Amino acid sequence: MKHFLFVALLCVTSLSFAQVTMSGIIKDSIGTPLELTNVIAIDPESGGLESYSITDTKGYYKLSLAKNSKFKLQITAIGFKSIQEEIITKEADIKKDFTMKIDDALDAVELTYEMPVQIKGDTLIYNADSFKNGTERKLEDVLEKLPGVEITEDGGIEVEGQRVQKVMVDGKDFFDGDTQIATKNIPSNVVDKIQVLKNYSENRQLSGVRNNQDNVAINIKLKEGKTNFWFGDVRVGAGASTDEALYVAQPKLFYYNPKYSVNIIGDVNNIGEPTLNGRDLRNFGGGFRAASSGSGTNLNLGTSTANFLNTNRNQVERIESKLLAGNFSYSPKDELDFSGFAIYNRANVDTRQRNDITYTDPELGIPNETTSQDADQVTDSGLLKLSTRYIPNVNNQLDYDILGSYTKEEQSQRFLSSVLGANTQLDENDPFSINQNINYYLTLNEKNILAFEAQHLFQDEDPFYNAVIEDKDTYENTADDIGLDLNQQNFDIVQDRRIKTNQFDGKLDYYNVLNTKSNLNLFLGTIFSRQDFDSRIFQFLDDRSEFDPTPIGSAGATNDVRYSFSDVYAGVRYTAKVGDFTFRPAVSFHAYGNNNFQNGQEFGEDFYRILPDVDIRWDIKNSESLTFRYNMQNQFTDVTNLAQGLVLNNFNSLFVGNPDIENGLSQNVSLFYRNFNLFNFTNIIANISYSKREDQIRNIVDFESVIRSSTVFNSPFADETLTAFGRYQRTFGKVRAEFQANFNYSKFNQIIGGNQSTNESYTQTYRPGIRTNFREAPNINVRYSYSVQDVDQGTNSNKIITNAPNVVFDAYIWNKVTFRTDYSYNSVDDGTNVNTFDIWNATLSYRKERQAKWEYEIRATNLLNTQSRINTNAGNISLSLRETFIQPRFITLRVVYTL
């Protein structure tokens, strides 16, 4: 592997330096340097872009050109006459200055090539064709080639270090802006321009008074001729494996015109390529944002979802998925818009894992444990959202959204422990929720603006858990503690739970524009939440009758809890721009009600708190800034942590809540630096943040063998977290190099076995990488990740070192054949053992020409037929090695028809 990486890097280096440099100064007729002037070099034979540059503040440009070649040079700047000139390169670098004349006539000039990147105010515009080489199939293939843009591991999009919140197509929301659905489904061949909208605001009236510096959206402009016509593709395929026949069918169809749009995505396959997995659907919020998101109050509503949301092909043995999704928008008139989506998804998943757990604290006396488990999981999910936006004039806007979600999930699991023996477990849950959102914005006059935002959530969850313990002897002490009938062939334990949530979150803002550089924001808001939690533990006896146990101690086998929370707050924020600095200090006053009712008693208290919030931004220059933030936040728990009765997190994990739990308070400070240089396409991002949390909710844990019993308490010791991140990225001609570094330090406290312990964790990760973007030659993307995880608990210390190189190679051959392959290697050293696994995939595609309707593809996944992957985790009292069995080698033949 090391030799392969060395050869790859050598090839990249040789390709990138077989060029000459052309540079110089561009100025106007009186000698003033011209910033942001576009300079491009075009290959006259192919018509393709060879190199491009945007002048810096000194008017300096630099191009990387092939030796002994001829190019057309094109120089453009707003308000000046375009320059077009022929350039012939030899072996030596070229120095050449240009003087641009003012274009008094403002006649239209025919340009032979569009600039790859342009800046218009807060909008960064990429010309997609300038970055394509023919191997792209979906939007994500284009995005990952753009300077300053990153596709994250979870499928999200980052631009200059900021997460993209929304993706639109021709100005219309694509599945409410969900980025992953967009990146994996929109065809690359229909993309003309990619507009990055910085400081994005859903409401024009508030764009000048609200802080939108963290809001980034992307708008995809379609190519000419793609509107008023259906476009997309239909992919079908088949293959074979050792266990069953393989199949895939994925229609993806789109229609856009100025009045309405329709998007339809279908998917039926058993090859491990689901369009959405369970976690994606659970996180699919439909673009909702709580009105109180910046108020300083964090209320955790919890979730009882099953823990089998990941359906990545490299995490499971088998996946069978079905999906049908539709998205629409309709504008009957200019002031009225309707939109919405409907999604149905079904996933049938088989998993198998093996765990080796070593307990590192000998004083606890916990035996080491080896477990194996295999499970069948079935999940049906449905989402439906409808939205309306009414803008009768520039002074009024009304938005209404409703999102309904329903899930039916079931897991049947077989579990074998070297300590506890064999058992079977069943998890079922049928949660549903209805989320409604209404916003109204009113501009009274040019100085005064009102905004009302409110959201209501109703959520109902009914998790069911059943465990049959076959080895009675190993579980008898725990069974006695629970109060089970011990005179049975096995222990058949059942737990029914029900959690209902009602929450209202509303806020009224008043903005007074003091002058062009400052404004005052007065706000009044409230959060009202009620959660009802009922649970019951019972036992099936041998004759299938039900037995109600009586646990030893104060905890009962049932819960009936009502948790009421309220926050009424008011505050003020002042925004002022002074020179290059923008100051946004704020303070809010909160009246909290935090009470729970159970067993005929009332717990909790009403109290008041003042929470400050400060945001200071220094715009060093147009594309360089430094932002400082400080705030205090109150963290409130969900109802399950308050319940006095016994709850089974699992058959080997018993939990009793604490009704006297109070809120935690955190102080957070961060510093974020951003620099995006369009001249040399250098992207620098750095962030450091520190958090100190007081009265945090922590665990008190006791062990009986490997069975844990826990409760919660407010820790009197402060928890601390320090996180630092940095990324440097620069483009050298057709080569882009980058280096990332992450550091995380955390300290928290808990009580284990009656002893208070302070746990410290250090994690550092380094990720160098290099990639090419040649139009004709093959391209390579090489990345390497080195991480160290170190967990220290007093006398115990666990360290894990991970090495993970990754190589992606793609080539477009003879304008007909596309070859793509990727290889990843992973090595984990826990100080005792070194575990490795590697994955190799490849795809070979043929289409007669670039715009051909038909494409034929052979795809192979897991070519090395790797049976499992290894993950090692260092905990505060244990070291865990998990072996996850994955899909075998799959080879499929596919046909793609492009509309």
Image (spheres, helix red, strand yellow):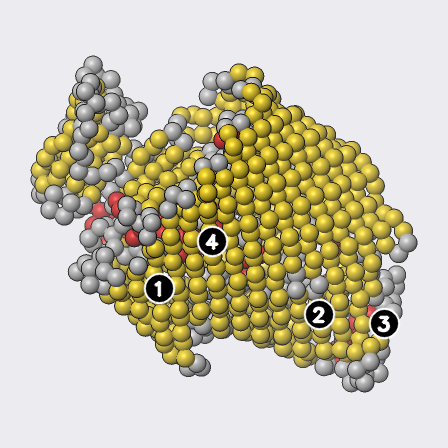
Q: Can residue 518 be seen in this view?
A: no
In the picture, the quarter occupied by the C terminus is: bottom left
Circle 3 sits on which residue? Answer: 549
Q: How far apart are marks 1 and 2 (CA)?
A: 41 Å
The residue identified by callout 4 is 327
Three-letter amino acid code at the position of disc 3:
Pro
Residue most extreme to the top:
30
Whether residue 742 is situated above or below residue 809 in the rendered picture: above
Q: Which amino acid does label 1 sit on?
A: Val
Query: Circle 4: is it few (<14), some (14-19), or many (20+) Cα within 10 Å?
Result: many
State which tag comes first along the sequence, 1 or 4.
Answer: 1
Query: Which of label 3 and label 4 is nearer to you?
Result: 4
Label 1 neighbourhood size at 10 Å, few (<14), some (14-19), many (20+)?
A: some
The spot of residue 24 in percent (x, y) is 19, 28
Measured in 3D between alpha carbons, the distance from the residue under mark 1 to the one under mark 4, in whole angstroms, is 17 Å
* Pointer 2 residue: 465
Q: Is residue 706 left or right of residue 541?
A: left
Is 77 drawn above or below residue 653 in the view shown?
above
